[in-house]
């Protein structure tokens, strides 16, 4: 019997009016991998992810999650997925524990298991000691880890993170990734992550896909992609070659993300 991959996209397309946001994506993510989806702003990463999470209907092509058709079995697929969107989803007026408990209830974690699962998720992201503080007093990195705990409380088999480290300082970024790696090692969870940071992709993703204008332009391990371009090439060089030098370093988005955090929690 063949084992289904965590994600399989076949000839996937989605247009917004005239804009072909996703323009024929074929992608397979084996179970248990940390997979990075990279690309400049507007490449189609979020639209792809929203179809995988079933938040956007699959109109053309297909998406399978652990062998389940995301177009037809939306609820079953949702039960397998934990999703941390770009937009912040933690409520600053609640404590960390209350935020995670809310998600446990939303995801129908059985009442008898709730406390244990909430404690486990908070512990996994290193927030057990701060769990009873109001989230408005958390740093940006702690908020991101809280959102990770919210996504983990339903014990998903596939964790999808849309730019989990944007707007964070290097130490907080490292902390988030350490937690992701640890959780993956302990649970065997598959992790699909988008990021603008090449250094993070290189260090933490086993395989990456570079997306540009709705299509996947390069796919492989960071080392394979670098070797394909030539000796001494970096992932930055690969990105530039693929996108025609559209690397923006995330500067403007960093500011936007930081402002969003401030607005929501302040
Ligand atoms: N709801 C929408 N309505 C209209 N156009 C949209 C919508 N969402 C995305 N688009 C367009 O689709 C294209 C792909 O956007 P998408 O958000 O998927 O890219 P992305 O790679 O996630 O970019 P970013 O890194 O900025 O999040 C862009 O041209 C964008 O303007």
Image (tube, rainbow, N blue to C red):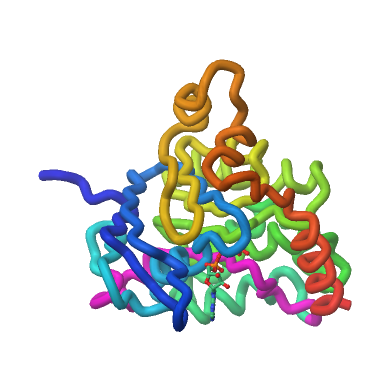
Residue depicted at x 69% and y 57%: 145
Q: Quadrant of residue 135?
A: bottom right
Q: Is residue 73 magenta?
A: yes
Q: Position of residue 101 (x, y in %)?
A: 61, 75
Quadrant for the C terminus, please: bottom right
In the displayed structure, 94 sits above or below 8; it is below
* Residue appearing at x 52%, y 20% in the figure: 230
Q: Nearer the viewer, residue 127 or 22?
A: 22
**Dividing the image into four equal quarters, which quarter contains ligand 1?**
bottom right
Q: Is residue 66 visible?
A: yes
Quarter occupied by residue 253: bottom right
Residue 245: image location, x then y, percent:
64, 45
Residue at (50, 50) in percent of width and height: 37
Q: Between residues 136 and 194, which one lies in front from this camera angle?
A: 194
Give the quadrant of residue 144: bottom right
Image-based side of 34 in relation to 163, left or right: left
Q: Give the vertical position of 220 relative to 28 (above or below).
A: above
Is residue 119 at least partly visible in the picture? Answer: no
Q: Is residue 167 above or below residue 175?
A: below
Residue 188 on image: x %, y %: 42, 44
Q: What residue occupies the far left of the structure in this picture?
A: 1
Query: x%, y% of residue 183?
Result: 54, 46
What number of labels is visible?
0
Magenta stretch bounds: 70-93
**In the displayed structure image, the side of residue 260 where residue 247 appears, left or right:** left
Position of residue 241 in the picture relative to residue 65 (left or right): right
* Residue occupying the point 59% across, 45% down: 244
Left or right: 105 as drawn, with respect to 140:
left
The quarter of the image holding the N terminus is top left
């Amino acid at each position: 019997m063949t084992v289904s991959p965590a994600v399989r996209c076949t000839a996937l397309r989605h247009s917004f009016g005239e804009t072909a946001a996703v323009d024929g994506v074929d992608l397979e993510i084996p179970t248990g991998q940390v997979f990075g989806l990279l690309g400049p702003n507007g490449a189609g990463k979020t639209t792809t992810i929203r179809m995988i999470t079933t938040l956007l209907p699959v109109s053309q092509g297909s998406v399978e999650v652990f062998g389940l058709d995301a177009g037809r079995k939306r609820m079953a697929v949702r039960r397998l997925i934990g999703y941390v969107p770009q937009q912040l989803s933690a409520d600053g007026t609640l404590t960390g524990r209350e935020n995670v408990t809310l998600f446990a209830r939303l995801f129908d974690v059985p009442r008898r298991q709730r406390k244990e699962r909430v404690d486990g998720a908070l512990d996994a992201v290193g927030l057990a000691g701060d769990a009873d503080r109001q989230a408005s007093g958390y740093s940006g990195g702690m908020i991101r880890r809280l959102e990770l705990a919210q996504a983990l409380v339903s014990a998903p088999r596939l964790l999808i993170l849309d730019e989990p480290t944007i707007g964070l300082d290097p130490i907080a970024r490292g902390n988030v990734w350490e937690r992701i790696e640890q959780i993956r090692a302990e649970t065997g969870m598959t992790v699909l992550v988008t990021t603008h940071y090449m250094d993070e992709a290189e260090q933490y993703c086993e395989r990456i896909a570079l997306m540009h204008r709705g299509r996947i332009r390069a796919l492989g391990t960071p080392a394979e992609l670098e070797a394909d371009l030539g000796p001494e090439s970096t992932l930055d060089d690969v990105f530039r070659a693929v996108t025609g030098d559209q690397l923006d370093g995330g500067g403007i988005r960093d500011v936007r993300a930081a402002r969003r955090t401030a607005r929501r929690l302040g």
